[in-house]
């Protein structure tokens, strides 16, 4: 106890010393910050104020003045270049960023940032070859921060897509995924689409056996890269059907059900045509009916309706629509029902039905569109690559009019499953 008491004065002194050192350190930091803030030009704060108040013209003038007073401040140059580019003044942005990238005394991070901004300026101005050269330099630069290298790779991937240089795009996408385990790769589906684009180009460019074999090899690459690549099987089925190999086309399209059944509607028309070419039209209709009952789709239903109307007449088509409307009520379905009723109507009722159908059709056609889940772009036709946001596989394979229908159908199937389980237990 006495030994502990003898140490108390020293402990007290140590605590006072530590407190004093902390207080002194804080004072020095605050003083340093105040000194730095006084050194910044007044124009800098004016520019910041203009930016916050969304006055870009005044902000640029203020930052230009600050830049003239303190040309050594790199951050000012970056801010100025970004403002020029945002306003569409690419030439001025390019001059700022290019001068910055050539400045001596920059850190590796600052130099790679300046080179990237220069490449972005070239990219915005459409000088893709200049942008490509700079981005390749950034990627190969020794000591470049990994985050900056990743950003450069992403811009380079976008550039190669613009140029439709799919082989180089595949290489860059693989580089972006190189540090990720196979189950976490982010670009597998995108790479599969690049292989499909190559396949389409090869197929269209040359009808020779070698060219077609190369095109099919690209589809094989797509499926190896991403086994759920529905697009590869859709394309292969179309090519087989065009060659008269109907049974093979049907087998390929059937494989889509195991990949993602919601895409079956995109193959429905070719699927039925292949069956009809083999003299198995009734079998094809029966299989499409099964698909429609399991995976409701406006595309499948429209093919079923048209085929029934053609082969069995208006009354049979109307009965088909009524049954589907009971399970999957949609305005598009009602439009088909009215079409069948108009064809079967007597002259005195036909005019009224045609007026009603015209009204329903105008509303249904606005709903029967594909919607990009990334940017909300609406399109009457299907896209693998969104024209608005350039995303891949961003269009769900269902039209907007059937979204609620599919959800209700799923809920009904789940309720039936639960009821069946209860009955088995009972």
Image (cartoon, rainbow, N blue to C red):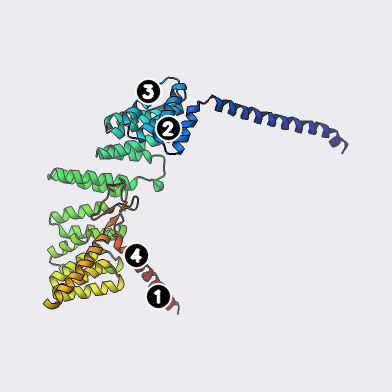
> Which of 357/270 is in front?
357
What residue does disc 2 label?
59
Q: Quadrant of residue 263?
A: bottom left
Q: Secondary structure at mark 4?
A: helix
Q: Is residue 190 left or right of residue 307?
A: right
> From the viewer's perspective, is residue 225 above or below residue 127?
below
- Does residue 174 appear in this view? yes
> Which of 20/281 is in front?
20
* Residue farthest along the bottom direction in this orientation: 426
Tell which circle, 1 or 4, labels the residue nearer the N-terminal end. Answer: 4
Q: Whole-Å distance between the Cαs marked 1 and 2? A: 69 Å
* Whole-percent x, y for residue 376 in the image: 33, 52
* Residue farthest along the right direction in this orientation: 2
Tell which circle, 4 or 2, labels the residue nearer the N-terminal end. Answer: 2
Q: Whole-Å distance between the Cαs marked 3 and 4? A: 56 Å
Q: Whole-Å distance between the Cαs marked 1 and 4? A: 24 Å
Residue drawn where x is 33% and y is 65% of the image: 406
* Whole-percent x, y for residue 248 in the image: 19, 58
> From the viewer's perspective, is residue 106 above or below residue 23?
above
Q: Nearer the viewer, mark 4 or mark 2?
A: 2
> From the viewer's perspective, is residue 35 above or below residue 278?
above
Tell which circle, 2 or 3, labels the residue nearer the N-terminal end. Answer: 2
Q: Nearer the viewer, mark 1 or mark 2?
A: 2
Residue 99 numbered mark, or none: 3
What residue does disc 1 label?
420
Residue 404 numbered mark, or none: 4
> Which of 190/318 is in front?
318
> Which of 281/66 is in front?
66
């Amino acid at each position: 106890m006495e030994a502990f008491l003898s140490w108390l004065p020293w402990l007290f002194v140590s605590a006072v010393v530590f407190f004093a050192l902390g207080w002194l350190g804080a004072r020095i930091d605050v003083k340093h910050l105040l000194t730095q803030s006084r050194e910044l030009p007044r124009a800098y704060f004016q520019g910041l104020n203009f930016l916050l108040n969304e006055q870009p013209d005044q902000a640029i003038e203020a930052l230009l003045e600050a830049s003239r007073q303190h040309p050594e401040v790199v951050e000012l140059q970056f801010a100025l270049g970004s403002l020029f580019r945002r306003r569409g003044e690419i030439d001025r942005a390019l001059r700022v960023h290019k001068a910055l990238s050539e400045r001596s005394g920059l850190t590796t991070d600052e130099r790679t940032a300046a080179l990237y901004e220069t490449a972005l300026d070239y990219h915005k101005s459409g000088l893709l070859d200049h942008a490509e050269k700079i981005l390749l330099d950034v990627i190969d630069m020794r000591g470049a921060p990994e985050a900056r290298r990743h950003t450069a790779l992403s811009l380079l991937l976008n550039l190669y897509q613009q140029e439709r240089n799919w082989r180089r795009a595949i290489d860059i996408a693989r580089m972006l995924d190189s540090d990720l385990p196979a189950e976490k790769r982010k670009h597998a589906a995108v790479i599969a689409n690049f292989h499909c684009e190559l396949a389409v180009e090869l197929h269209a460019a040359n009808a020779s056996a070698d060219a077609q074999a190369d095109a099919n090899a690209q589809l094989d690459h797509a499926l190896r890269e991403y086994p759920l690549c529905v697009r590869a099987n859709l394309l292969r089925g179309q090519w087989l059907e065009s060659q008269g190999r109907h049974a093979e086309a049907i087998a390929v399209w059937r494989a889509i059900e195991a990949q993602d059944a919601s895409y079956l509607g995109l193959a429905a028309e070719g699927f039925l045509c292949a069956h009809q070419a083999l003299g198995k039209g009734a079998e094809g209709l029966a299989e499409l009916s099964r698909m429609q009952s399991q995976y409701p789709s406006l595309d499948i239903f429209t093919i079923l309706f048209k085929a029934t109307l053609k082969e069995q007449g208006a009354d049979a088509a109307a009965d088909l629509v009524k049954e589907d409307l009971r399970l999957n009520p949609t305005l598009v379905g009602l439009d088909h029902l009215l079409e069948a009723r108009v064809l079967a109507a007597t002259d005195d009722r036909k005019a009224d039905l045609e007026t009603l159908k015209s009204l329903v059709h105008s509303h249904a056609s606005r709903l029967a569109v594909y919607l990009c889940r990334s940017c909300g772009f609406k399109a009457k036709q299907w896209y693998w690559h969104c024209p608005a946001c350039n995303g891949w596989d961003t269009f769900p394979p269902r039209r907007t009019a059937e979204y609620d229908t599919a959800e209700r159908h799923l809920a009904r199937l789940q309720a039936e499953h639960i009821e069946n389980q209860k009955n088995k237990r009972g």
